Image (cartoon, grey):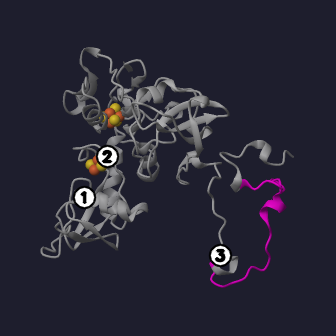
């Protein structure tokens, strides 16, 4: 068997080796953290995805060992493969940060700022991008595009006004179901996701379009307006399902299951596609074998108040304070009198509740 050729690539001053053919974005994800550019349209599990939104732009400051010339323009990292000796700048490039702010401004041209009433709020990639790169005002003077809400079958609603035309849902329907009946109609400013002759999408796996949509354009009708995601407690659970892996995340409040989604990895991508029956019809805890709390990135608003898997630091104060010992050390928990001393917040499963704290 021939050995796989490895290329050395340096992204934001960190060098790794990846197989030839890897995209810059995937190489950056291997490094992880902020080095990985944001991606609104690329989805590693969908063939042909990427190249639409331009949020993943990076600067290639050295093309390769053989041809060290920099690339003249910023490139979409999801669609550009690494070369041996390539040097890439993402967060270390002011040009990239500036261009990304421009891309976010473009994406928001027609996007309504209805986060307060949008079901995707709290887990919306565009919301995160806007917080990181957005401007407080808009320079757009024209009327925004407006569309009626459409029901795509009995369980999914399309809010085309929020769509950023990433094509992920179209690829999902194409690649997961045998019979795609929705797609993109028209071009440019008129382009829209539409179902041909309003046919309902009743394929067993079509619910996955909700999970791949990076914004709140495709929402779960069984969950719409029922709760905010950050009030819910995500739990990993599974069931014996003849159609899919049956591995899901349940979003509970108390015993009540508010919604069921596929499990998502650190890049917000689905780990295993799930079927409609698991997603829309199994809304009782008794339908599931509960595995335990889902770990949510601590940067997500959903993790606020969730103390699962927090680690008590082992360093002493002196060690993290350049060797200087404090003059006075107070325990904020005892001083503030807010916590109950007998309750260890890091051991609570799920969000802390008011009765975990002193009521005074
Ligand atoms: S509906 Fe969502 S997934 Fe589909 S193209 Fe629009 S933003 Fe992308
Ligand atoms: S993620 Fe690369 S262009 Fe959209």
- Gap between marks 1 and 2 measured at Cα: 12 Å
User: Helix, strand or loop at disc 1?
Assistant: loop
| Residue 317, magenta (yes or no) | no
Q: Is residue 345 left or right of residue 284?
A: right
> What percent of the width, then of the height, locates residue 67?
12, 73
User: Helix, strand or loop at disc 2?
Assistant: loop
* Residue 164 visible, this orientation: no
User: Helix, strand or loop at disc 3?
Assistant: loop
Measuring 45% from the left and 43% from the top, which residue is drawn there?
A: 127
Measuring 29% from the left and 16% from the top, which residue is drawn there?
A: 199
Contact check, label 3 and label 1, Cβ < 8 Å: no
Above or below — where is 3 with respect to 295?
Answer: below
Q: Which mark is residue 43?
A: 2
The residue pinned by badge 3 equals 315
Above or below — where is 33 with respect to 190?
Answer: below
Which span is picked out in magenta?
320-345
Ligand 1 quarter of the rendering: top left
> What percent of the width, then of the height, locates residue 73?
19, 60
> What percent of the width, then of the height, locates residue 139?
35, 42
């Amino acid at each position: 068997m021939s050995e796989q050729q490895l290329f050395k690539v340096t992204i934001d001053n960190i060098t790794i080796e990846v197989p030839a053919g890897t995209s810059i974005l995937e190489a950056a994800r291997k490094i992880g953290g902020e080095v990985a550019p944001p991606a609104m349209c690329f989805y590693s599990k969908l063939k042909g995805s990427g190249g639409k939104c331009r949020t993943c732009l990076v600067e290639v400051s050295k093309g390769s060992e053989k041809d060290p010339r920099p690339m003249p323009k910023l490139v979409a990292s999801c669609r550009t493969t690494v070369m041996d000796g390539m040097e890439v700048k993402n967060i270390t490039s002011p040009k990239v940060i500036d261009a990304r702010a421009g891309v976010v401004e473009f994406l928001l041209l027609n996007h309504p700022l209805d986060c307060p009433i949008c079901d995707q709020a709290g887990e919306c990639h565009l919301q995160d991008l806007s917080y990181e790169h957005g401007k407080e005002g808009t320079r757009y003077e024209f009327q925004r595009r407006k569309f009626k809400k459409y029901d795509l079958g009995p369980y999914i609603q399309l809010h085309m006004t929020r769509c950023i035309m990433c094509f992920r849902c179209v690829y999902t329907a194409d690649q997961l179901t045998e019979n795609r009946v929705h797609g993109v109609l028209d071009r440019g400013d008129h382009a829209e996701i539409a179902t041909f002759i309003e046919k309902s999408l009743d394929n067993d796996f079509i619910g996955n379009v909700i999970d791949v949509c990076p914004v709140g354009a495709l929402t779960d009708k069984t969950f719409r307006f029922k709760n905010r995601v950050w009030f819910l407690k995500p739990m990993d659970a599974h069931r014996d399902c003849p159609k899919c892996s049956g591995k899901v995340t349940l979003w509970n409040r108390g015993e009540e299951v508010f919604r069921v989604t596929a499990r998502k990895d650190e890049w917000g991508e689905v780990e295993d596609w799930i079927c409609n029956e698991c997603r829309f019809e199994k809304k009782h805890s008794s339908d599931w074998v509960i595995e335990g709390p889902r770990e949510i990135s601590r940067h997500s608003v959903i993790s606020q108040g969730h103390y699962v898997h927090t680690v008590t630091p082992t360093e002493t104060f002196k060690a993290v304070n350049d060797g200087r010992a404090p003059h006075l050390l107070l325990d904020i928990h005892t001083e503030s009198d807010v916590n109950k001393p007998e309750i260890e917040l890091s051991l609570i499963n799920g969000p802390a509740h008011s009765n975990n704290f002193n009521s005074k």
